């Protein structure tokens, strides 16, 4: 990193890559992505602290299913398709809550937090059937490194450690994210392809040009040191405060964390950023098979009030301020540009476009998307 800054260079991909608007506009491609990516591999849907305590749940909109994610009595987590097995009514309409029994609003069938069908209304007239086969449909879910991961496909299994591979699994373990709490997660629905959003947050090339008065003041632009693990990757970017070390013959110490941001790209749709004081997590997924609608979730994971040594009031104020800064940059600077890309690429003659050698992280993101699409073809 320090030699990169000294020489004004960055890690690079082997060549410039060309691409077309279809990558972000083609409905057939969007459908393939929904099934071959989100229907096949694990991705993060919540931090464990968002469903603390038995019967606590969140509802999540995934590309293939609307789901309920709920903590069980024994501390494990289950995920269900949020649809009644009678006539398909939406079982849970709240975004989050705590519930001992799910009661369907349509005819009041009810289900346990473990998904079992408990009561059938007026069952003397309904007729006999095997209730054990009409519990809520389960989705594969696993908790690891403080996150809840799902494969959005009832026909699949899940193995997060295997998906992450030894290197990324070890990096995430070292961050001890399970000891942190998720502070006020934010969900956005954007009129933008999920890959346009993901690319926007992998991009260190735009920092000082799109954010001249905010992030660009604090962070270096176009200087990335990256380690590629074949599927997922890790990279370092830096704050300008690192400059005092440039040209010095020093070795890496843990205090360097104050001058850097460690980023992990967790394929297929997640960026985890480690700052000196907290972890940020950005996830992106399409809405159904729509090429031009996506859900972006942003999370801040911070030490608990007790671990921070702050009073509850100071703690709350601190993270509120952190969120205000993040949201301002997002709303005023990133979203207008990224939504604009989606609008611009509705132009049928937008022309062939280029991804530079310096845009290494985006090349690796595309490599993995291509591989997943090919694997499911
Ligand atoms: S649809 Fe749920 S009880 Fe009828
Ligand atoms: Fe940005």
Image (spheres, rainbow, N blue to C red):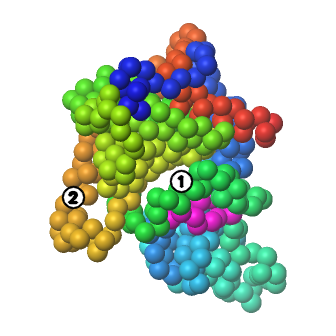
Residue under numbered circle 1? 171
Answer above or below: position of 67 versus 265.
below
- In the picture, the quarter occupied by the C terminus is top right
Left or right: 164 as drawn, with respect to 180? right
Residue toward you, 33 or 203: 203
118 is within the stretch colored magenta: no
- Give residue 216's quadrant in the image: top left
Q: Residue 266's x, y, as percent?
A: 57, 46
Gap between marks 2 and 1 measured at Cα = 27 Å
Q: Residue at x 66, y 59 (%)?
A: 161
Residue 47 visible to an observer of this rendering: no
Q: Is residue 367 above or below residue 281?
A: above
Q: Which residues are magenta?
A: 140-152
Foreground residue, 152 or 306?
A: 306
Q: Position of residue 283 (x, y in %)?
A: 49, 47
**Which disc number belongs to residue 318?**
2
Which residue is at a point 46% across and 43% down the rendered structure image?
A: 263
Question: Which residue is at 23% across, 31% downward?
Answer: 217
Q: Residues within 10 Å of mark 1 (few under 14, many from 20)?
A: some
- Label total for image: 2
Image spot of residue 126 (x, y percent) = 75, 82
**Magenta span includes 144:** yes
Residue at the (43%, 21%) spot, across then down: 9
Q: Which disc, if any, is residue 36?
A: none
């Amino acid at each position: 990193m320090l030699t990169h800054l000294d020489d004004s260079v960055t890690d690079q991909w082997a060549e410039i890559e060309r691409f077309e608007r279809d990558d972000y506009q083609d409905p057939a491609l969007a459908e393939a992505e929904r099934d071959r990516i989100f229907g096949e591999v694990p991705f993060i849907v919540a931090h464990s602290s968002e469903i603390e305590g038995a019967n606590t749940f969140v509802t999540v909109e995934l590309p293939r299913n609307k789901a309920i994610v709920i903590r069980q009595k024994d501390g494990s987590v289950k995920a269900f398709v949020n649809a009644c097995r009678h006539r398909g009514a939406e079982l849970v309409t709240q975004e989050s809550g705590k519930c001992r029994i799910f009661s369907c609003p349509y005819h009041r069938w009810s289900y346990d937090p473990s998904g079992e069908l408990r009561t059938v209304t007026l069952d003397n007239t309904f007729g006999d059937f095997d209730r054990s086969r009409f519990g809520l449909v389960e989705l594969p879910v696993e908790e690891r490194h403080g996150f809840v991961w799902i494969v959005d496909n009832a026909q699949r299994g899940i193995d997060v450690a295997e998906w992450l591979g030894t290197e990324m699994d070890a990096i995430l373990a070292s961050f001890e994210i399970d000891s942190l709490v998720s502070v006020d997660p934010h969900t956005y629905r954007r009129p933008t392809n999920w890959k346009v959003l993901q690319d926007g947050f992998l991009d260190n090339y735009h920092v000082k040009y799109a954010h001249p008065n905010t992030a660009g003041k604090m962070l270096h632009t176009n200087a990335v040191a990256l380690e590629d693990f074949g599927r997922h990757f890790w990279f370092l970017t830096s704050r300008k405060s690192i400059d005092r070390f440039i040209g010095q013959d020093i070795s890496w110490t843990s205090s360097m964390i104050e001058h850097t941001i460690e980023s992990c790209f967790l394929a297929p749709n997640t960026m985890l950023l480690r700052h000196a004081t907290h972890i940020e997590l950005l996830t992106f997924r399409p809405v159904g098979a729509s090429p031009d609608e996506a859900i972006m979730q942003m999370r801040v994971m911070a030490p608990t009030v007790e671990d921070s040594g702050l009073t509850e009031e100071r703690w709350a104020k601190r993270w509120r301020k952190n969120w205000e800064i993040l949201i301002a940059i997002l709303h005023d600077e990133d979203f207008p540009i990224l939504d604009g890309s989606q609008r611009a690429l509705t132009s049928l003659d937008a022309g062939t476009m280029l991804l530079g050698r310096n845009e290494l992280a985006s090349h690796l993101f595309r490599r993995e998307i291509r591989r997943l699409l090919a694997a499911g073809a």
